[in-house]
Amino acid sequence: MSVASLFKPFQIKSLSLPNRIVMAPMTRSFSPGGIPTEDVAAYYRRRAEGGVGLIFTEGTAIERPAAKSRDEHPDFHGHGLTGWARAFDAVHEAGGRIAPQLWHVGAVHPDGTDPDDPARPVDTPSGIRAPAGAFGRPMSEEAVQDTIDAFAAAARHAAAIGADAINIHAAHGYLIDQFFWALTNRREDAWGGTDIADRSRFAAEVIRAIRAAVGPDLPIIIRLSQWKQQDYTARLATTPDEMQRWLDPMTDAGVDLFDCSQRRFWEPEFEGSDLNFAGWVKKLSGLPTITVGSVGLNAEFLTFFTDQKMRPAPIDELVRRLERGDFDLVAVGRALIGDPQWATKIREGRFSELVTFDRSVLKTLI
Ligand SMILES: Cc1cc2nc3c(=O)[nH]c(=O)nc-3n(C[C@H](O)[C@H](O)[C@H](O)COP(=O)(O)O)c2cc1C
């Protein structure tokens, strides 16, 4: 099997990539006080040296009081920016490209969190934490606007410290996804509604504000998922038509690329076609897409939270779909946490050198 298609260049607006391999955004919690350390910079630098085309940082918090749920999650404001500037420089020195994943957790906070703590009031669309029920209160119009402004401010900071693109975290049951999801968005104002197009408006306004902040050339990428950490079987769009109505507001707002999160990239999205999530999003939006989900490994990502070993798996099916044009880029998560040289090994056909690993690799930044 030839892997040549994975190593073709890709260009979108000001972003030129030497290949199709993207490091998926992965929270590592090694940024005490919200400031990425030198070790974090070196960790991302190793992935650039290892031949990754585009690195997405872990989710990094916008400037809202409860945008993150742990002190060790990095901030994308204040002193956090000093650490990120160091990481971006390290990646660029190694010839890589890097984009921050801008994040707000919404209602996803540890048990025992007081959602009304005046120092850190929690932001949620409708005061609901799925599936448990009431949590906090619906965001005021002012809070919604301030959150949109905070995404835009973070993007402006990102451009100023040399980001190669922006990734907006709108997946996995966090704040923007809580706006998409009918279970957690019960609003009857302009930020909610019975149609998914209505619930897509918040994401669209975040994109518009970011575009105004960074100008026309910096690519804006948004990460979407059907699944939620609160419910792995949840689906926002159950038909292509519904998916179209979900995507259109974001496309109209000027997003450049959809990052389509699945747990297993080979699973068909709708009956009657083998197209996966990224395949359908590309077909319906006409925009380039990224696929992700168990690339190069024999088990899906939840195994990271068990004692199971993760073994290398063939990538033939991935290459077949890439060559067919289903998607444009391929994000790799755990395989890159376990092995910074993964992309180089794939390019050079050193498949026997791919490593088996388990969750112990999460203890340090290798
Ligand atoms: C430790 C860990 C942390 C993650 N953190 C994030 C995150 O901050 N943002 C995000 O969008 N996805 C996050 N994910 C999901 C990954 O980006 C990716 O979509 C998922 O692991 C599937 O890819 P894989 O099968 O190649 O690992 C995380 C996954 C893991 C294993």
Image (tube, rainbow, N blue to C red):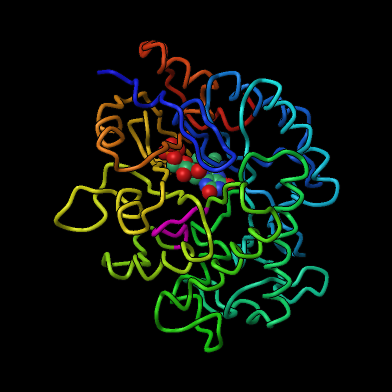
Residue 291 placement, left or right of 41: left
Query: In percent of the image, x 55 and y 19: which residue is there?
Result: 50
Q: Position of residue 249 (x, y in %)?
A: 47, 69
* Front in this rendered view, residue 75 or 214: 214
Span highlighted in magenta in the image: 222-230
Query: In percent of the image, x 37 and y 28: which residue is there?
Result: 296
Q: Could one spot residue 15 in this view of the protein?
A: yes
Q: Can you name the residue that lies furthest to the bottom here?
A: 188
Residue 326, placed above or below residue 310: below
Q: Position of residue 89 (x, y in %)?
A: 75, 29
Residue 176, placed above or below residue 333: below
Query: In percent of the image, x 46 and y 48: which residue is there?
Result: 259
Q: Could one spot residue 306 in this view of the protein?
A: no
Q: Is residue 97 magenta?
A: no
Q: Quadrant of the C terminus?
A: top right
* Front in this rendered view, residue 194 or 6: 6
Query: In percent of the image, x 63 and y 55: which residue is there?
Result: 103
Residue 341 placement, left or right of 294: right
